[in-house]
Image: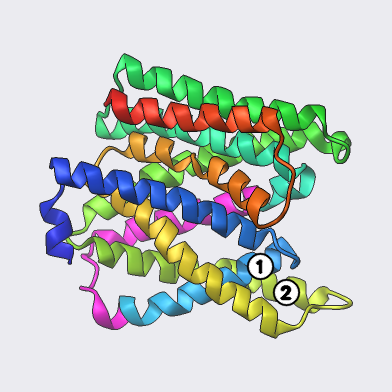
Amino acid sequence: MSAWLISLEGTPAGSDLALALALMAAFLHAVFGALQKGRHDPWLSRGAIDASYGLMAAPLALFVVPWPEPHMWPIFAGAFVIHTAYKLLQAQAYVKGAYTVVYPVVRGTGPLFTVIGAYLIFGETFTPMQWLGVAVLLSGLFGLALYNLRHLETARDTLVPALGLAVATGLFVALYTTYDAYGIRATADPFTFLAWFFMLDGIVMPVIATLRWRAMTAPPALGPLALRGIAGGIIAFLSFGSIMLATRLDKVGEAAVLRETSTVFAAVIGWVFLKETVGPRRIALMGLIALGAVIVEMGG
């Protein structure tokens, strides 16, 4: 399968596959977010998810995929540091601010910084039509944040640090997206990068979650938490793995922008499955996000 994927790099078929992978990553990212948002403490949910995909990836990394080339070890170290910082910033942003305000800001700043980083590192350029699409998508994302802010009833006293943390988290989204694209292109077999990335990335959060669980006066039962972790681990493989493969097959910036349609999928999931009220204004803003992604793809 690796040889087949590599043969598609830089081809129209590879571009089509990258589009499908980016959209699949967007949908699964929304599912991942809904799963992590469940009834458990988000730190515990993330710890269970990371432990699951780390354990799932270990036998693949150690016994199935080709061993990493020597130059990959510093790259894995960098990815480990960047992703750990991202998770800690994200968790702290959600502690300080309301989810509906913080999340659109994180997802809005992420693709903007990624497009800039892809230009500086990979020499990727966007057409004027694609920049228009980016502007439309960002107007939907930040418009959604402002709309949610107007109706915010909680966490107003910590709003400023929450927004600062959200922007910093968005910067790290861009950093890991660009860095992971560099890493998966640096190895001969893309599945080598994926397997070792997931194994190493699953180390830190389970430790934090375990310490947090032990400090609780009434810790939740481990069975349901473990089941949530296994489900989240499988979704993480498919979601993050898809976007990483998409950045190897085609432009990093386009994949990053298309992934932000996850906000639209999240609204649909919240409306259909969680019975949350969406409303016409939110639907219009979600439509802008989707329209921006379509313009970016067509403008290329």
- Residue beneath disc 1: 45
- Assign a secondary structure to mark 1: helix
Kindly tell me whether residue 10 is visible in this rendering.
no
Marks 1 and 2, how far apart at CA? 13 Å
Residue 34: give x, y in percent of width and height.
63, 57
Please identify the dominant SS of the magenta region.
helix
153 lies left or right of 59: right
- Residue beneath disc 2: 211
Q: Nearer the viewer, residue 185 or 133?
A: 133
- For the N terminus, the quadrant is bottom left
Identity of the residue furthest to the top in this view: 128
- In the picture, residue 117 is in which quadrant? top left
Q: Residue at x 62, y 62 (%)?
A: 35
Amino acid type assigned to the residue bearing label 2 in the image: Leu
| 275 shown above or below 131 | below
Residue 279: give x, y in percent of width and height.
71, 35
Taking the magenta stretch, the answer to whether it contains residue 83 is yes
- Say few, some or many: other residues with alpha carbon within 10 Å of mark 2 (under 14 / 14 to 19 / 20 or more): few
Residue 114: give x, y in percent of width and height.
42, 34
Q: Residue at x 62, y 44 (%)?
A: 267
Amino acid type assigned to the residue bearing label 1 in the image: Ser
User: Is label 1 in contact with label 2 (beta carbons under 8 Å)?
Assistant: no
Give the magenta-colored segment's residue range. Answer: 62-90
| 253 shown above or below 146 | below
Taking the magenta stretch, the answer to whether it contains residue 229 is no
- Assign a secondary structure to mark 2: helix
Tag 2 or tag 1, which sits nearer the N-term?
Answer: 1
- In the picture, residue 191 is in which quadrant? bottom left
